[in-house]
Amino acid sequence: MTGGAEPSGQVSDEHAPEMPGWRCGSCGEDWPCATKRSRLLTEYGDRATLSVYLGSCLAAASEDLRTASVTSLQDRFIGWLPRGPRTT
Ligand SMILES: [Zn+2]
């Protein structure tokens, strides 16, 4: 990791999860990382649709991360969502 003139793009900026550890492929945080969370909110806009998507991620992650508690996974995948209906 000493190369200097490497153009950015070497590391993906997708902030996609890496299986089976469910860490962000771009920044290495637990997925969804802070960057991905704000992107998801922007991408989906609709909290209900995003909840469905995150629910499916949670289901897959709980298969991979069997040592993690369900509560902590729920908190990690869904608990960060803004509460309440979004006024338009
Ligand atoms: Zn990330």
Image (spheres, helix red, strand yellow):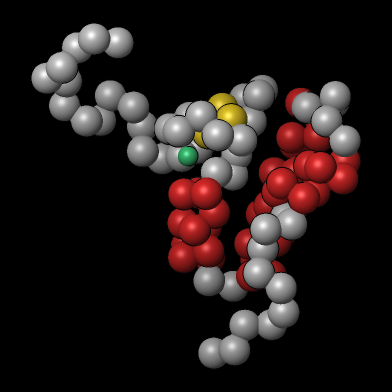
Q: Nearer the viewer, residue 56 or 83?
A: 83
* x, y percent for residue 38: 49, 58
Task: Say which residue appears at 41% left-offset and 40% top-offset.
Answer: 14
In the rendered structure, the answer to whether residue 57 lies left or right of residue 88 reads: right
Vertical order, 45 against 80 (above or below): below
- Which residue ends up furthest to the left in the rendered image? 5
* x, y percent for residue 32: 59, 44
Task: Say which residue appears at 36% left-offset and 32% top-offset.
Answer: 12
- The image quadrant that residue 17 belongs to is top right
- Which residue ends up furthest to the top in the rendered image? 2
Q: Nearer the viewer, residue 82 or 50?
A: 82
Is residue 17 visible in this depiction of the protein? no
Vertical order, 11 against 57 (above or below): above
Quadrant in the picture for the N terminus: top left
* x, y percent for residue 70: 88, 41
Quadrant in the picture for the C terminus: bottom right
Task: Say which residue appears at 71% left-offset and 46% top-offset.
Answer: 76
